[in-house]
Amino acid sequence: MADFKSAGSSGSPPPRRDPSNATRLGVRPEPLRDLYYQLMRRSWWLLMGVLAIVYLAANSVFAMLYALDPHGFSGTTDLRFGDAFSFSVQTFATIGYGTISPKSVYANTLVTIEALLGLMFTALATGLVFAKFSRPRARVLFSNTMIMTRRDGKPCLQFRVANARGNDLIEAFLRVTLVKSEHTPEGVRMRRLYDLALERSMTPLFSLAWVVMHVIDEKSPLFGETEQSLADDEVLFIATLTGIDGTLAQTVYARQLYEYHDIRWWHRFVDITTIRETDRGIILDLRKFHDVEPEAGARD
């Protein structure tokens, strides 16, 4: 097998490639059709901001429409924008304090339309918030780097995962895929996906930490590769973990992408597990979760 040796680092920043952020050409954007998906995918701040903007914009529009008929309301002789906005909020939210009430046909028609839209907005906002709040999410930590170390005299690619929430993650299954280039006999360069054989790809109960290991032998797609060859090919590693949340009884997943430059050669992970002396319980020090150190006899 070819020797693994360090490659010199270049001055350019290392690439970070995420397939979900790819630029798609030739596809007509349909923001309204994808609005629900984007709101569920993005942060809570975006969802709350969108709901607030729609709420304020709708009430402002109806306030301006109410102000077109300033004498069409009881309880005021001259409806100004501020009063119209307050009345719109009461109607939109179906509060109805009764200080101002519509009396003209125009005003009553607007109230009917706004009340209907207010009910629809409340239903949609409630559904979005509940769906986003109830969506199960795994708090799985992936180590920032992979390491190349030795196991039973053979090179071994490793990374570390941990359950930060500490709940039961049942039947957790982890899969690692290597993306590398190959050339066909016709000379066509293709990006191929190879599943890496792991020493253990499933655990019945994942609640602490897990060191994922792939031994590089003659059957490995990494056999014969060097650090320089991995860099020249710009290989990518895709790690996905799925399992059943024991609290919610729903499937959760997590993923991590590793670039070729995320591999620390001839290092090992710092131990993060100790035993508590008082009751012999386990202490998991996640403050050192990403820390690595050179292995004994590491080469430059």
Image: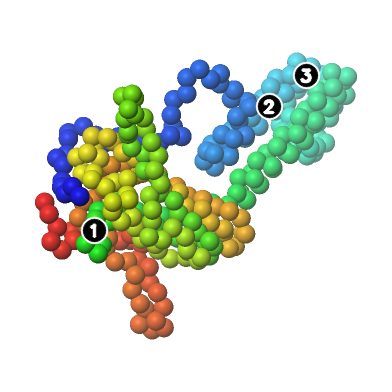
- Left or right: 239, with 215 as reference point: right
Query: What x and y, as percent, mark residue 192?
Result: 38, 36
- Left or right: 59, with 14 as reference point: right
Query: What x and y, as percent, mark residue 262?
Result: 28, 45
Query: What x and y, as percent, mark residue 29?
Result: 56, 21
Q: Which residue is mark 1?
A: 154
Q: Which residue is mark 3?
A: 70
Q: Nearer the viewer, residue 65 or 231?
A: 231
Instruction: Please name which of the two marks, 3 or 2, marks the residue nearer to the observer.
Output: 2
Q: Which three-letter amino acid code belongs to the residue tagged 1?
A: Lys
Instruction: Please name which of the two marks, 1 or 3, marks the residue nearer to the observer.
Output: 1
Please name the residue shown 40% across and 63% down the image. Answer: 209
Please name the residue shown 25% across and 64% down the image. Answer: 152
Mark sitting earlier along the chain (2/1): 2
Please name the residue shown 82% across and 19% down the image. Answer: 71
Question: Are the residues at dot 2 and dot 1 in contact (C-beta closer than 8 Å)?
Answer: no
Q: Is residue 121 above or below residue 274?
A: above
Labelled disc at residue 58: 2
- Left or right: 52, with 189 as reference point: right
Determine if residue 182 is in view. Answer: yes
Please name the residue shown 69% across and 22% down the image. Answer: 61
How far apart are the alpha carbons under marks 1 and 3?
85 Å
Q: Which three-letter amino acid code belongs to the residue tagged 3?
A: Pro
